[in-house]
């Protein structure tokens, strides 16, 4: 039987950072495999290495030791340009504090996804509007990001992340700055996207969100456990 | 990337970059603009002096030197004789030589004075003066002492005289055979011996014309106030000068003054050097100060925009893209500051030129130089901040979110 290639795979990933007291080991040999269509949630206390793991998965950082394979292709040793090319189209990232450009409208923020991709103006706009519709914010397209509520901001950030239909959507504490109602609407958004076939990797310290995940992993002291 | 979205993205990025810290951007803009005002003014002064130097050389004549009796304190000057001019012409056949005697003649009709230059047919072409109408004095006029004159166009206008008109000088009538445009009066007193200046109200007549204004004797009429020697284009004045000096050695080494283009431009060159040194230092200082302010702005911008840098990297921007963003932002500030500085300098140049008559000049070079320098300044002073921004790891930038 032919096994499907995982979207993301990490083999023995270690990550350490320099500090005045010497190198700090944040990840200590992480093995992870995320298959297409999964909704994987990693929980763990602050400082456990969740965000570092997510950054490595989002191709924003490199492991000190170990291999990272994206769609079967090893990315650890890729050149800058090829890595950026992968980042452009294959991953979408949602951040805890939204990372929106406050002076721009919701639509312009989503369009910013195409900043380093290019494409036709009309096509980009159509994809951005569609992404906003997917997260239920079509009517807020022309509102400046700074006047949106926190929940709306996070949904705009999700629309930006999915506008190019990435292979993997990664979210770092997406409900960390939201009230309970907004957190639910954002998580419902993730669930709908996952149901539509998008693979999701979400890290959070909020175990109340586990019901949305198809698989749950725990990160503790740099080690990942089922 | 298609041109339109790329342009749209760039415009938006640059506009937001400039608006991110309006105070800081404004300060850098001001500092750089002051620097470019100083630089443009310096270039305008230097170009004005260069044009002035060209005017002076044009006034004297191309490749021309003049010899005059040296002024002596107490003693009378050793006279210069027309025969010395003839000797030069004979010994230097490749050169064009012309002697002149100068008279100031009163005009009783309007109580004005005109400058009369008693000379030969060579003075007009030698000094680079151009005929506007009629003809120049010719060999026959000089040999026969014809009562023919060439008058300056300014005088022709004043007298309403044309070719064939009769003009009266000291009760002697002369027929106007030519009207010439003389120099623009560029040989000013502070830089050049006044004896080679002509002014605008000038009459040229053959030195052999039978007139003796002021009761001068025949010997005195043989005296010359100046002899002009034009060196052929393939030779340098400096090469002919020692030979000519040697030929007129009978007047004594101290007896004659020699005016060459080099001597004529010595004063202008002195000014050019002084302006270059003083003005250049000020302009350079202003630009370095402006550039340093810009660099501090860019560094602060990098620090404040870490999350944005992280976001851009997460969306696929390469290090080059990030460096380019900051560099183009810096070049935009310096470019616009240069345009503003040049605009202000242009205004100042106009005011100074009109009110104080200082010879300032603003040409294409004074615009292109600062613009080129603005871009260079933007690149140089944003290099380090841009490099710093480009080398921040995206994960590290996003941790500052």
Image (cartoon, coloured by chain):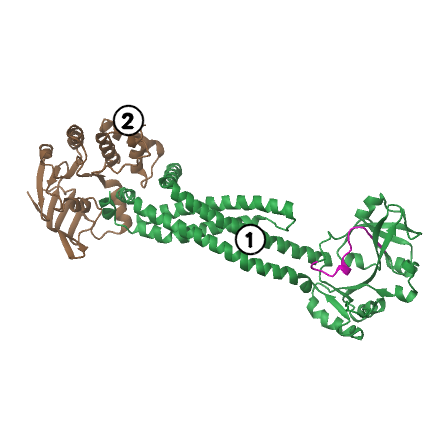
Q: The N terminus of chain A appears in which quarter of the rendering?
A: top left
x 91%, y 56%: residue: B146
Coordinates of residue B249 in the picture (x, y in percent): 78, 74
Q: Please indicate, yes or no, whether residue A92 appears anywhere in the rendered image.
A: yes
Q: Colour of chain B?
A: green
The extreme left residue here reads A226
Q: Nearer the viewer, residue B141 or B289?
A: B289
Q: For mark 1, name the chain.
A: B
Instruction: Measure the C-alpha gap from mark 1 to mark 2.
Output: 55 Å
Residue at point 74%, 53% (across, down)? B183
- Taking the image as shown, residue B357 lies to the left or right of residue B250, namely left
Which numbered mark, 1 or 2, is in the foreground of this view?
1
Is A127 placed above or below B244 here? above
Q: Please give the count of numbered marks on the rendered protein.
A: 2
In the visual, does B13 lie left or right of B30? Answer: left
Residue drawn at the location 21% of the way across and 49% of the way down: A61
Residue A86 occupies quadrant: top left
Q: Residue B144, percent across and down?
A: 92, 59
Q: Residues within 10 Å of mark 1 (few under 14, many from 20)?
A: many
Residue found farthest to the front: B74
Q: Quadrant of the C terminus of chain A?
A: top left
The residue tagged with tag 1: helix, strand or loop? helix
B193 in magenta: yes
Number of residues whose C-alpha sits closer than 10 Å to that of mark 2, classed few (under 14), some (14–19) or many (20 or more): some
Can residue A72 be seen by looking at this rendering? Answer: no
- The residue labelled by disc 2 is A140
Would residue A128 appear left or right of B54 to someone viewing this image? left
Magenta stretch? B190-204
Q: Which mark is residue B42?
A: 1
Say which chain is brown: A
Is residue A31 shown in magenta? no
Tell me where residue A217 appears, x and y as whole percent.
Answer: 8, 41
């Amino acid at each position: 039987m032919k096994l499907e290639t995982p979207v993301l795979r990490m083999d023995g990933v270690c990550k350490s950072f320099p500090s005045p007291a010497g190198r700090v080991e944040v990840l200590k040999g992480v093995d992870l495999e995320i298959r297409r269509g999964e909704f994987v949630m990693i929980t763990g206390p602050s400082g456990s290495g969740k965000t570092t793991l997510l950054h490595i998965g989002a191709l924003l950082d490199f492991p000190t030791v170990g291999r990272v394979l994206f769609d079967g292709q090893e990315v650890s040793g890729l050149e800058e340009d090829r890595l950026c090319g992968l980042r452009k189209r294959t991953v979408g990232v949602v951040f805890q504090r939204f990372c929106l450009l406050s002076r721009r409208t919701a639509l312009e923020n989503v369009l910013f996804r195409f900043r380093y991709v290019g494409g036709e103006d009309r096509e980009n706009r159509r994809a951005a509007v569609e992404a906003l519709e997917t997260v239920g914010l079509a009517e807020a397209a022309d509102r400046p990001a700074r006047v949106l509520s926190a929940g709306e901001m996070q949904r705009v950030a999700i629309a930006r992340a999915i506008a190019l239909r990435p292979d993997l959507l990664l979210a770092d504490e997406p409900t960390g700055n939201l009230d309970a109602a907004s957190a639910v609407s954002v998580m419902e958004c993730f669930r709908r996207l996952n149901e539509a076939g998008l693979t999701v990797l979400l890290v959070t310290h909020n175990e109340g969100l586990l019901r949305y995940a198809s698989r749950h992993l725990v990160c503790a002291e740099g080690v990942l456990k089922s | 990337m298609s041109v339109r979205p790329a342009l749209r993205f760039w415009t938006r990025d640059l506009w937001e970059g400039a608006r991110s810290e309006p105070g800081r951007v404004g300060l850098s803009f001001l500092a750089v603009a002051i620097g470019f005002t100083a630089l443009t003014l310096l270039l305008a002064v230097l170009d004005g002096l260069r044009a002035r130097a060209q005017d002076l050389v044009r006034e004297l004549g191309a490749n021309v030197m003049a010899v005059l009796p040296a002024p002596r304190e107490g003693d009378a000057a050793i006279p210069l004789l027309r025969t010395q001019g003839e000797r030069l012409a004979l010994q230097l056949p490749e050169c064009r030589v012309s002697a002149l005697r100068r008279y100031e003649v009163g005009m009783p009709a309007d109580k004005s004075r005109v400058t009369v230059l008693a000379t030969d047919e060579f003075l007009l072409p030698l000094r680079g003066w151009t005929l506007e109408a009629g003809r120049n004095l010719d060999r026959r006029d000089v040999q026969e002492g014809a009562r023919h004159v060439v008058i300056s166009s300014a005088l022709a206008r004043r007298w309403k005289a044309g070719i064939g008109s009769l003009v009266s000088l000291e009760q002697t009538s002369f027929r106007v055979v030519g009207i010439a445009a003389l120099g623009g009066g560029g040989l000013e007193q502070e830089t050049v011996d006044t004896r080679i200046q002509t002014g605008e109200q000038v009459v040229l007549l053959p030195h052999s014309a039978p007139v003796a204004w002021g009761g001068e004797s025949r010997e005195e009429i043989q005296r010359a106030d100046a002899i002009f020697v034009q060196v052929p284009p393939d030779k340098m004045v400096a090469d002919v000068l020692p030979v000519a000096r040697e030929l007129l050695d009978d007047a004594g080494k101290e007896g004659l003054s020699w005016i060459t283009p080099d001597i004529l431009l010595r004063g202008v060159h002195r000014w050019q050097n002084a302006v270059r040194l003083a003005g250049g230092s000020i302009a350079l200082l202003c630009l370095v100060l402006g550039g340093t302010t810009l660099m501090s702005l860019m560094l602060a911008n990098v620090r404040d925009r870490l999350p944005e840098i992280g976001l851009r990297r997460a969306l696929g921007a390469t290090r080059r893209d990030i460096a380019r963003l900051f560099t183009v932002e810096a070049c935009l500030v310096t470019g616009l500051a240069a345009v503003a500085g040049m605009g202000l300098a242009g205004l100042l140049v106009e005011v100074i030129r009109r009110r104080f008559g200082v010879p300032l000049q603003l040409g294409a070079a004074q615009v292109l130089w600062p613009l080129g320098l603005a871009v260079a300044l933007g690149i140089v002073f944003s290099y380090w901040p841009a490099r710093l921004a480009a080398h921040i790891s995206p994960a590290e930038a996003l941790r500052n979110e």
